[in-house]
Amino acid sequence: MISIFLIFHMALPLIISEIPYIKNNFKINRLSLLIGSIFPDLIDKPLSIMEISSGRGFSHSLFFVFIYFLVLLALTKGDKSISVPFFIGCLFHLALDMPSIPLFYPFVYYDFSILKDPIGHWWIILLTNPIIQATELIGAAIFIFIIWNNKLFSFRDIINYIKTNSIHSNKD
């Protein structure tokens, strides 16, 4: 399990991209946005499980998010339609994890505490913290709203929605 708080981290930037002004005026690569919204955890959570770093370590800093953006921009040969949504997703992730992240690492020292049983710790938080439970339920409600509002009633429609900037692109 990479992150137990995955739902809200992905749902919030996705629902922002559904705001009519944004949806109608900007092409947003939803897949890149979704990957960016969980990317800091994709780096830090496995390091935490291996007891190398904390679950909110160096990849939860503005410096490294900017580095990821620059690397992705170079890998995509300057394609901002992929790198910018990824960057925005990462920024959403950092905002949702605040204040307990090393936002200005490596320029400011942070004590990265290493948990002996991170998965057990995350389960306890999920099962006992009503704020985490509420945000995950809100995230699930957001996903249901997006599915219902965009009539994404098949797995194929959901995949097309994520892969493209339009709805039902193969049916038009």
Image: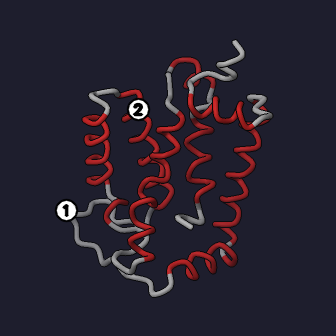
Quarter of the image that includes the N terminus: bottom right
In x, y percent, where is residue 66? 28, 46
Q: Relative to 53, is 16 above or below?
A: above
Q: Which of these two is toward me, 103 or 14?
A: 14
Q: Amino acid at mark 2?
A: Ile
Looking at the rendered structure, the secondary structure element under dot 2 is helix
Spot occupied by residue 6 in the image (x, y as percentages of width and height): 58, 58
In the shown orientation, is residue 23 left or right of residue 89? right
On the image, which quarter does residue 101 sit in?
Answer: bottom left
- What amino acid is labelled 1 in the image? Phe
* Disc nearest the viewer among 1 and 2: 2
Element under disc 1: loop
Give the numbered dot on residue 82.
Answer: 2
Q: Residues within 10 Å of mark 2 (few under 14, many from 20)?
A: many
Residue 100 visible to the viewer: no
What distance separates the C-alpha of mark 1 from that of mark 2?
28 Å
- Foreground: 103 or 154? 154
What's the mark number on residue 107?
A: 1
How many labels sit on residues?
2
> Which residue lies most toward the bottom here?
116
